[in-house]
Image (tube, grey):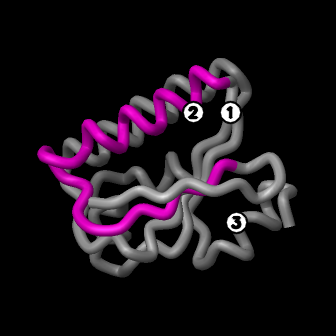
């Protein structure tokens, strides 16, 4: 898994590629926790290059979401493939996370575009 970070206005965009699984989730959690500690309130995960996510990856996202909510923060996703989207749907996390079809729509919804 690779993670590239960039800013789009007040939004931290993380371009994630590869598999978000038991082996790689700690890296993503560390990056998200670092951003949250830096008082970053709006995070967009661009999952265009994510090919697989497992329960540990979902737990990582839930943990970051729970850290952000009390601060009034947001964690949203964009460009989620059908395979990865189905994991969110089965776990009913598509009701928890806002998932945008593309980055442009996400940034517009977050007030950065």
- What residue is pinned by disc 3? 106
Contact (CB < 8 A) between labels 3 and 1? no
Quarter placement of the C terminus: bottom right
- Whole-angstrom CA distance, mark 1 to mark 2, is 5 Å
Residue for point 52% across, 65% down: 46
Disc 2 secondary structure class: helix
User: In this rendering, which labeled residue sits more in front, label 3 or label 2?
Assistant: 2
Disc 1 secondary structure class: loop
Sequence order check, earlier mark of 3 and 2: 2
With respect to residue 104, does 68 lie above or below? above
Q: Which residues are magenta?
A: 12-38
Residue 29 belongs to magenta span:
yes
With respect to residue 61, does 112 lie above or below? below
Sequence order check, earlier mark of 1 and 2: 2
Residue for point 38% across, 75% down: 49
Q: Dot 2 surroundings within 10 Å: few (below 14), some, or many (20 or more)?
A: some
Percent across and percent down for residue 9 are: 83, 54
Residue for point 26% across, 37% down: 26
> Which residue lies most toward the left here?
23
- What residue is pinned by disc 1? 40
Q: Dot 1 surroundings within 10 Å: few (below 14), some, or many (20 or more)?
A: some
- Whole-angstrom CA distance, mark 3 to mark 1, is 17 Å
Residue 50 belongs to magenta span:
no
Disc 3 secondary structure class: helix
- What residue is pinned by disc 2? 35
Percent across and percent down for residue 71 are: 69, 21
- Whole-angstrom CA distance, mark 3 to mark 2, is 19 Å
């Amino acid at each position: 898994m690779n993670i590239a970070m960039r800013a789009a206005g007040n939004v931290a965009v993380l371009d994630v590629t590869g598999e978000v699984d038991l082996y790689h989730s700690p890296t993503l959690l560390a990056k998200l926790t670092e951003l949250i500690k830096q008082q970053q309130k709006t995070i967009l995960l661009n999952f265009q290059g994510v090919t697989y996510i497992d329960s540990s990856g979902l737990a990582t996202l839930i943990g970051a979401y729970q850290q952000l909510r009390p601060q009034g923060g947001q964690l949203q996703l964009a460009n989620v493939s059908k395979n990865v989207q189905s994991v969110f749907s089965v776990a009913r996390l598509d009701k928890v996370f806002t998932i945008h079809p593309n980055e442009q729509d996400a940034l517009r919804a977050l007030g950065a575009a």
